[in-house]
Image (cartoon, helix red, strand yellow):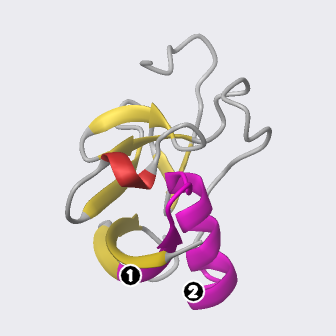
Amino acid sequence: MELHKVKFEVLRFRPEQDEQPVFQSYEVECMEDWVVLDALNAIKDDIDPTLSHRWSCRMGVCGSCGMLVNGRPVLTCAAFVRDYGGTIRVEPLSNFPIVRDLVAKHIEGRQLGF
């Protein structure tokens, strides 16, 4: 399967060193059938092991991989990279406080926003 480079801008927040969240860019070699979660896992596994994000089932059921992709709330395990043109911007869900990077603190009783 053919690989193609995709630029990702990922919101980073490391409370021990950052006062405010900042975007960090990554160039990722993606396969045609990858979802955004695959790219985030590739960043963590092959480029930057300090990146923090959550995921569990990879089947669009649990909701733990919910993030903003290009400003829209999605399950990253169901958001195909090929459906986005240009740079893909990934952030934690906006209605929850950021714990670290793409990990948001889920507050009981609040809706995920999907």
Name which quarter of the figure residue 24 lies in: bottom left
Q: Is residue 5 part of the magenta span, yes or no?
A: no
Give the residue at mark 1: 26
Packing grade of label 1 (10 A; few <14, some 14-19, many >=20) is some
Q: Quadrant of residue 48?
A: bottom right
Q: Quick check: is 28 in the magenta stretch?
A: yes
Query: In this view, which residue lies farthest toward the bottom?
Result: 47
Q: Which residue is painted at 55% across and 65% down in the image?
A: 40
Q: Residue at x 37, y 30 (%)?
A: 95
Q: Amino acid at mark 2?
A: Asp
Q: Which residues are magenta?
A: 26-50
Q: Are marks 2 and 1 in contact (CB under 8 Å)?
A: yes
> Could you classify mark 2 by the number of other residues whose Cα lies within 10 Å: few (under 14), some (14-19), or many (20 or more)?
few
Q: CA distance from mark 2 to mark 1?
A: 9 Å
**Residue 48's mark?**
2
Q: Amino acid at mark 1?
A: Tyr
**Residue 68 coordinates in the image, percent (x, y):** 37, 42
Up-down relation of residue 114 to residue 106 (above or below): above
